[in-house]
Amino acid sequence: TNQGIRSNLAFSSDGGQVSFVQNRSLYKTNIDGTGLIQLTPAASETYEFSSVEWSPDRQKIARIDYTLGETQTQRISIVQPDGKLLAQ
């Protein structure tokens, strides 16, 4: 099921790329829409929404997933622009 974009659009500091979460996966693309790359596989959990941010030096992308309700949870993942997971 296509869930559409479930995060903000996070622009790299040089404005050349944008990252976002769609269908529980983290993506990046060039600002002109070319070069779409899936950086992470779909998360196994379903989150209410996600937030994405680039580091100022464009070497890392942070993804924060939120679940709301009686038990509120957050999961933070940090990846390199090539998709290598650095921390979770």
Image (tube, helix red, strand yellow):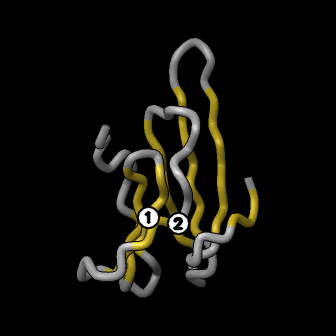
Task: Give the vertical position of 38 relative to 1 (above or below).
Answer: below
Of 34 and 52, the residue lying toward us: 34
Residue annotated with mark 2: 39
Q: How many marks overall? A: 2
Query: In the current view of this chain or complex, which residue is farthest to the right?
Result: 87
Q: Mark 2–mark 1 contact, CB under 8 Å?
A: yes
Tag on residue 27? 1
Identify the image quadrant of residue 80.
bottom right
Residue 75, position as x, y percentages in the image: 65, 42
Q: Quadrant of residue 59?
A: bottom right
Q: Please tell me whether mark 2 sits on a helix, a strand or a loop.
A: loop
Residue 35 point in image, percent of width and height: 35, 81
Which residue does the image show at 45% across and 32% down from the upper left?
A: 48
- Residue at 64 percent of width and 67 percent of height: 79
Secondary structure beneath label 1: strand
- Badge 2 crowding class, 10 Å Cα cut-off, few under 14, some 14 to 19, many 20 or more, is many
Which residue is situated farthest in the left direction here?
32
**Residue at the location (56% across, 76% down)?**
81
Q: Residue furthest front?
A: 1
Query: Which of the numbered marks, if any, corresponds to residue 15?
Result: none
